[in-house]
Amino acid sequence: MLWRYIAKRLLIGVVQLFGLIIAVFFLIRLLPADPVSRLVGMNASEEAYAQAAAQLGLDQPVMTQLAQYLGLQPSVQPGLLQGSLGISWVTNEPVLSEIGAYLPVTIELITLAFIVALLVAVPVGMLGALNPGGRTDKGVFLYSLFAGSQPEFWWGLLFVYVFYYQLGVAPPPLGRLSPMTNPPDFVTGFMLIDTLIAGSLPKFLEALHHLMLPVLTLAFILSGPIIKMVRQNMLRALQSDFVLYANCIGLPKKRVARYALRAAMAPSMTLIGILYGFMLSGAVLVESVFSLGGIGQYSIRSVLAFDYPAIQGVVLIITAISLLVYLLLDLVHAAIDPRIAH
Amino acid sequence: MTLLTVRNLQVTYRSETAVSRPVDGASFTINPREVVGLVGDAGAGKSTAALALLGLARAPGAITGGEVIFEGRDLLKLPEDDMRAIRGRDIGIIVQNPRAALNPLLRVGTQIGNAYKAHNQSTEAEARKQAVDMLRMVGINDPDRRVEAFAHELSGGMAQRALIAMALSSRPKLLIADEPTSGLDVTIQAQFLDEMWQTVQATGSAILLVTQELGVIANYCDRVLVLHDGRIVEDAPVRQFFESPRHPYSQDVLRLFRERGGEYPAQITGDRNFLKTDALTKHFPLRNSKKVVQAVDKVSLSIGRAEAVGLVGESGSGKTTVGRCLLRLVDATSGQITFDGTDITALLPADMRKIRSRMQIVFQDPYDSLNPRWTIEDLLAEPLRVHGTPDRATVRAKATAALKLVDLDPALLDRKPRGLGASTLQRVNIARALILDPEFVVLDEPTSVLAPRARNGLIALLAKLQKDLGISFLFISHDLTTVRYLCQRVAVMYLGQIVEEGTVEQVFSTPRHPYSAALLSAHLFPDPINRRVDHPVPAALQGEIPSPIDVPKGCYLASRCPHALEACRATAQTLTQLPDGRQVRCMRVVNGDI
């Protein structure tokens, strides 16, 4: 039953992705942009222009381009069906391997940030709901007044100023490892994992140290909505009939609180999933401040250069990950709440 | 020695703008093993008082005064932990809307086990065994499987039983039952209350039974407390309460019962076939299937001029669909409807519209059927505008007259539905139905959301309208007491068919069809002399109502009927007239076997 549900969701996901590929493919080509002249320059001769266009395949009819992209003509060039996202027009590297290098940076960053944010925000939101108007609540109000109203890159800069420049507890914001350190061999792209695979504990700790400030910045921003949501859901759960009834039959206070928390977490899953999907490309400002070459920066570079294969590849991969995250959280939600039927 | 003494209990709700005290100085006592009824209007503070006995109040309310003395200790002065120990162990409670009171995320057995473990030293396995035993005790079949169920998998009756299993798991000395049967079907209501009564007799608990239903009070309680404006205004043994209520509120509630006594409404004379259906049938197609839901099955019904005909039956029996077919709000699949000599089954929309001004409908939920953004005048004027566009002055005059007709103050015309009570809004609905001077009105459970006092008022109003204006009513209801006071004739429906039809007196005093008999025996009439708990009750029908998708070949009731023979299962039953004029769909009754 469960496996059938997962299979069905994955199948639907593939259909969604296919629709998205087609849409993005045509929408990009509708833009009033000329990627060829962006590559060869405004003053290039007509021959050079034509040669570049032919090289990019842009002289072909649109439908032929689409067929090639999808991999329906593997004799000409490999496409999606062959597991290729195409070749970047800017770097001449395969898009897939580029994304493979950039994406883990972002995933590592936001996953850690989410874990930290949840560890802080859930208890804080709970306390706020258990004692509305109390000290926790007032603190949260002050925090949301500041955190919510200022952009994250500003907080990043501020944290760099305080923790690196003033206190000196954080490393400079210059990437994932110190510039003097030799990075470990590329295996997964996740620095924390690759350093461990390389068997170097000092490098692992250094990577963790470098992640400290960016994770802190993101977690600081993410905690706002999560606290608010947990508090809201918790308040609703505490006012529900079944919590009142749990009190009526004299269950211990702790058990009543557990009843309420579980009921509050179930609906929170959805928002966490949406936030995660959003952060995949939304973490770009923090990545820039800390010189982390993440997927957000890769997207911006591709868009500015009209690098069609790269743009298509990024959209495809980010959507696929979002869909997987949604599926995962739906499964967690269903495990918490038996009313969600597959 | 009293079990519980309440003195000057006060609960206060404080908002930024107002302070209200739903319970304000209530005092009463409960003796061991006594069944005490607590009655009062909706909003009289009954549920608030019941919760306050446990030292609880819904936010933002708080208990602001009084004493609740239970076995010599004032519960309101106890420390939190001692109070928690008493809740559930010495005082159990069951509440209305049981499904919401169960934790939706945990299995029922786990919840009962948790309640048991909170008050008894026990292992996980013992708690689970206790859960199974309790579920069996409250009459749940297959308790070993049911402990694994979640709240949403239980029916309302089942959930209420699970709640009572939890409440009684530690054998409390007092059980508070707060409207335990609201939302249950009539047939299950009596069965549940019987079971609760028997269970409590077995555990030796006293009951405080909070209810609005006089039938429940009369059949189960030893003593009645009347809560009005936050105080107990009457405290009397149940028979004395019904014979000579002292407080004006009690007198009001019991007015119909006292005035009408055993009388039935007088039969009408004249045109008996003002509205007539012939083999009216309605099927709803099922999606992705060739099968259909057979909602109404060959219903032939006639309603005379100025006659009120009751249509009764369990939920899902097709009552509402019949009402909607009559006005062609849904079109019948087959059959014929004749209104005042005209066949309206296939009238064109323009002609139907003309007829429609002569037939109206009032729906069950008064809140849902009135647009909250319109004023009462707009609401009343809408039918007038639809059927011709009279000038403003005429609309105003007619709207005023319509409000007066239903005993409402014309000052309401400029108000919006918000803030008006259910009974006022239901009167507005009736006024809106009456504003076109209809000759026939379908009333679809118009009293089911009303408190008893408002219900009495509405019944009196409908009877007056029927007499003064000569309107015919189809009164759809599961409340047999109301039907008994209002209708001349009654038709009993089961699974889309009429199984018995006759005068109210015939059907109510000597029901012949086994289903009518079961329905009437399950109904709690407000009669404290002939109490259910004092004599053996005829067994309720076994099993569940069959699915209207795959209806049985023979008699629809055969699977549940104690009199069923092989022949009943094989042959379809026909509605046959008996010598006394009533019609019954049962071959054994017609043959004189039962």
Image (cartoon, grey):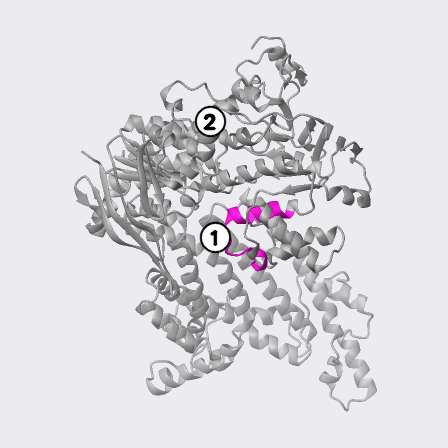
Q: Nearer the viewer, residue B25 or A110?
A: B25
* Quadrant placement of the C terminus of chain A: top right
Furthest residue toward left: B72
Q: Nearer the viewer, residue B88 or A86?
A: B88
Q: Amino acid at mark 2?
A: Gly
Residue B308 in the figure: left or right of residue A164: right
Could you classify mark 2 by the number of other residues whose Cα lies within 10 Å: few (under 14), some (14-19), or many (20 or more)? few
Could you classify mark 1 by the number of other residues whose Cα lies within 10 Å: few (under 14), some (14-19), or many (20 or more)? some
Residue position for label 1: A332
Provide residue B480's location: percent of width, then percent of height.
52, 30
Provide residue B255's location: percent of width, then percent of height.
45, 35
Q: Nearer the viewer, residue A140 or B341?
A: B341
Specify the segment rendered in magenta: B412-432
Q: Are marks 1 and 2 on the same chain?
A: no
Q: Residue at x 51, y 58 (%)?
A: A270
Q: As displayed, is residue B273 above or below residue A293?
A: above
* Quadrant placement of the N terminus of chain A: top right
The numbered dot on residue B261 is: 2
Residue B184 in the figure: left or right of residue B268: left
Q: Quadrant of residue B535?
A: top left
Provide residue A116's location: percent of width, then percent of height.
40, 67
Furthest residue toward bottom: A43
Mark 2 belongs to which subunit? B
Q: Amino acid at mark 1?
A: Val
Magenta stretch prevailing secondary structure: helix
Asked if residue B469 can be seen in this view, the reply is yes
Q: Secondary structure at mark 1?
A: helix
